[in-house]
Amino acid sequence: MLMGADDMTGKSGMPEADGQVYDAVRGNWVDRLAPAAARPYLRLSRADRPIGTWLLLLPCWWGVLLAAAATGWRWFDLWIIAGCGIGAWLMRGAGCTWNDITDRDIDDKVARTRSRPIPSGQVTARQAAMWMAAQALLAFAILLSFNSDAIILGIASLLLVAIYPFAKRFTYWPQIFLGLAFNWGALLAWTAHTGHLALPAVFLYLAGIAWTIFYDTIYAHQDKEDDALIGVKSTALLFGENTGAILRLFMMLSVILMSAAILMALLPTATLVEMLLCLAGAWALGGHMAWQLARLDIEDGDTCLMLFRSNRNAGLIPALFFAAAIML
């Protein structure tokens, strides 16, 4: 299993005395600054591993920024952007806490996960459930500031959040379920801006799902040996040595679907420059994914983790291009 620069544990994967988690970023703020009593709960929320919050947040920003590029910027969009940021942190935390509760009998069998707060004994499942509820309620309070259609979409996403932790028990495609959950914000944020769901948002959502399958398959290659031993499924096990070729297809699918979303959203009202800027964002995302594939070594856990984390920058690229189109 993964042993590299970000390893914060011993060779067994067990936490050190202060409870640091195996794959947390070295010197993260939780381990350095948070009160000792709060650290297990912040670790449940993955506050020491912020990449997941970014990956949940970025499709939200895609949705609101593409909607604003299509229909015009509104000052309420600033709150949508900020509210999605806070909500993504909270809901990612609630979702990860739920995942750790449901996986507590699996996590202690996997080197990368046995240092998490529940299997390592830092918190009980009951304490984790109370923390999950608190995060979800705060996120719901933010959701109530949006319009009614967006609120309905936000509530509907809970079904996907609930199902995802169980997907790896019955399908080799749990990454699809992760993509369905993690990219829901593209639908919600588009709707929060426009007041209704529309086809461009659906295509943007599908583009995000293809992107999620891409990056989470890379991530899953860290655990494939342990997953195979304990009977947990993933696209990493399914694709095997064909991972690079198959992920290239998902890379192209993501770019095509995002380009289609842009064309549907901006035609016929946008200027040519606005259109080209937004399309450049989709193509630049594809360029970053191609860069990842060129460096991918599915047998090197350090490389897989590095490439997975680089998807924060990959996802920021379309958001920045959409924002540039709005400012024209």
Image (tube, grey):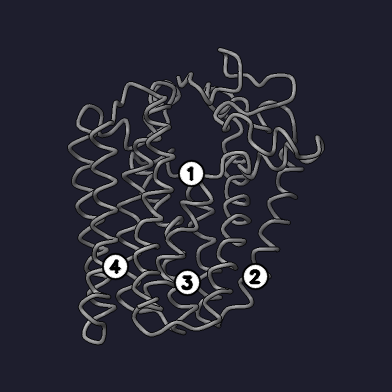
Q: Is residue 228 above or below residue 137?
A: above
Give the residue pinned by disc 3: 189
- Amino acid carrying label 2: it is Ile
Determine the secondary structure under disc 2.
helix
- Amino acid carrying label 3: it is Ala
Callout 3 crowding tier (Cα within 10 Å): few <14, some 14–19, many ≥20: many
Question: Which residue is at the front of the view, 118 or 159?
Answer: 118
Q: Considering the image in quadrants, where does the N terminus appear?
A: top left
What's the distance in space between the residues labelled 3 and 1, CA to CA?
Answer: 27 Å
Q: Residue at x 71, y 39 (%)?
A: 125
Mark 2 vs 4: CB contact within 8 A? no
Determine the secondary structure under disc 3.
helix
What's the distance in space between the residues labelled 2 and 3, CA to CA?
Answer: 13 Å
Question: Which residue is at the front of the view, 286 or 149?
Answer: 286
Q: Is residue 128 above or below residue 305?
A: below
Give the residue pinned by disc 1: 166
Mark 1 vs 2: CB contact within 8 A? no
Q: Along the polypeptide, which appears first: circle 3 or circle 1?
A: 1
- Amino acid carrying label 4: it is Phe
Q: For the view shown, which residue lies furthest in the front direction?
A: 328
Q: Along the polypeptide, which appears first: circle 1 or circle 2?
A: 2
Q: Residue at x 48, y 57 (%)?
A: 160
Q: For residue 79, what is the image quadrant?
A: bottom right
Residue 126 percent across, percent down from the top left: 75, 42
What's the distance in space between the residues labelled 1 and 2, CA to CA?
Answer: 27 Å
Give the residue pinned by disc 2: 142
Look at discs 1 and 2 and give the one toward the viewer: 2
- Amino acid carrying label 1: it is Phe
Q: Along the polypeptide, which appears first: circle 1 or circle 4?
A: 1
Q: Considering the image in quadrants, where does the C terminus appear?
A: bottom left
Q: For residue 254, what is the image quadrant?
A: bottom left
